[in-house]
Amino acid sequence: MFDDLRDTPEEDPISNAGFAYEPEAAGPEPRIFGMTAGQRLVISLMLLATVVILGLSCTLVTSKIWF
């Protein structure tokens, strides 16, 4: 097998023997949870606001801060 490597023609190199380039089919852009980037941003900001409000509520209830 390796005895005739120097006699291999240039138009059919061993690295490309039997392989053909097949481009991937361009499909729709993958989405996380089926939402666009803007929708995910709004959801994350709403979640952040909820966590902040719950945190402030808990500190007010336990009298750790006063207004």
Image: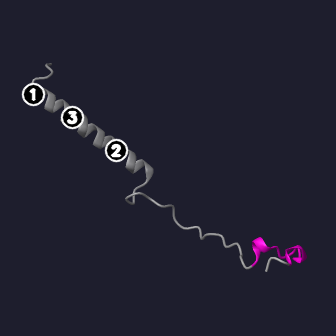
x 65%, y 70%: residue: 23
Q: Tag 2: Cα neighbours inside 10 Å, few (<14), some, or many (≥20)? A: few
Q: In this view, does 59 lie to the left or right of 7?
A: left
Q: In this view, does 55 lie above or below 12?
A: above
Residue 18: where, in percent of width, then height?
Answer: 73, 79
Q: Is residue 60 above or below residue 41?
A: above
Q: Tag 1: Cα neighbours inside 10 Å, few (<14), some, or many (≥20)? A: few
x 87%, y 76%: residue: 8
What is the secondary structure assignment of the residue under circle 2? helix
What is the secondary structure assignment of the residue under circle 3? helix
Q: State how far apart marks 1 and 3 are (Cα).
A: 14 Å
The kind of residue on which mark 1 rests is Thr
* Residue underneath mark 3: 53
Circle 1 or circle 3, nearest the eye: 1
What is the secondary structure assignment of the residue under circle 1? loop
* Residue underneath mark 1: 62
x 71%, y 76%: residue: 19
